[in-house]
Amino acid sequence: MKSTLIIGGARSGKSTYAQEMARKSGKAVLFVATAEAGDEDMKKRIETHRESRPSSWVTLEATNHIGSQITGKIGNAQVVIIDCITLLVNNIFMRYNDNTDADLAEEEVMAEIEELTDCIDRSNAQFIIVTNELGLGVVPADRVSRLYRDILGRANQRLAQYADEVYLLVAGIPVAIKKAC
C-alpha cells in the first residue's frame, strides 16, 4: 500500500487516526504540516498538534509546493503524513482574497495535487494524507466559500481516485471507503 487518504469533518478524528497508523507502522516518520499561524487561535492549534507528535518524528512545515519540499526533506522516512490538504488548499486560495479567479485558483490547487502525486510515485515511502470533507453540509451563502468548497472537493476527488485506500472518519470511527487490492 503506497497511499491512504483520510477524509472527514472537523474534529472527526482524522489527524489522530493518521498518527496512530504511523505509530503502529514502527517506521521513521516525516510529518508534513501545512497550517499557517495567521492568528492566536491557529498558533495554539499548531502548538497542540506539535505536542501530540512523537519527538522522534521529523516535521516539515510547508504551506505550498509540498511535493518538492517532501522530496528534499524525506531522508530516511518510510511514512509521510500530510496534515492537511484542506489547509494547503486554503493557503493557495487565500492569496486571492475576495477577488478569487476560480479557474486560476483551481489550476494552482490541481498543480499542487499533481506535484504531490508525482512525489508519491517517485518515493518508496507510505503516504497518509489527511483532508476535510466539506460537501456534506449546506451550500455556503457566499461565492468565495462556494468556490473554496468546490475546489477542495475536486482536489479530494483526485486524491481519492489516486489513493490505494480511503477512510472516512465519523465521530472517531474509521469507515473504509476504498480498500487496497
Image (spheres, grey):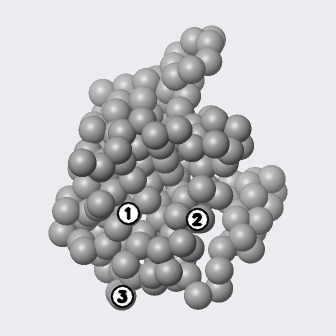
First reached walking from the N terminus: tag 1 or tag 2: 2
User: Looking at this view, is 95 or 155 the one in front?
Assistant: 155
Element marked by disc 3: loop
Residue 128 drawn at (x, y percent): 43, 59
Dot 2 falls on a residue whose secondary structure is helix
Crowding at mark 3 (Cα within 10 Å: few <14, some 14-19, many 20+): few
Where does the image place residue 159, in percent across and percent down from the top left?
A: 33, 43
Q: Is residue 169 visible?
A: yes
* Foreground: disc 2 or disc 3: 2
Residue picked out by circle 3: 76
Q: Dot 1 corresponds to which residue?
A: 127
User: What whole-number distance in Å separates the C-alpha atoms at marks 3 and 1?
Assistant: 14 Å
| Helix, strand or loop under label 1 | strand
Residue nearer the viewer, 15 or 83: 15
Mark 2 belongs to which amino acid? Answer: Gln
The quarter of the picture where residue 57 lies is bottom right
Taking the image as shown, residue 107 lies to the left or right of residue 11, namely left
Residue positioned 56% across, 73% down in the render: 23
**Distance from label 1 to label 2 (Cα)?**
12 Å
Q: Residue at (60%, 49%) from the top-left corner?
A: 14
Question: Which residue is denoted by mark 2 in the rendering?
Answer: 19
Residue 111 visible to an observer of this rendering: no
Circle 1 Cα neighbour tier, 10 Å, few/some/many (<14 / 14–19 / ≥20)? many
Q: Amino acid at mark 1?
A: Phe
Estimate how packed mark 2 is, as few (under 14), some (14 to 19) or many (20 or more) residues with alpha carbons within 10 Å. Answer: some
Which of the marked residues, 3 or 1, is nearer the chain's N terminus?
Answer: 3
Looking at the image, how many numbered discs can be counted on the residues? Answer: 3
Drawn side of residue 48 relative to residue 134, left or right:
right
Check if mark 3's residue and mark 1's residue have beta carbons within 8 Å.
Answer: no
**Residue drawn at (19%, 62%), measured in percent from left and top?**
121
The label number, if any, that marks residue 115 in the structure image: none
Identify the residue shown where x is 37% and y is 26%.
Answer: 102
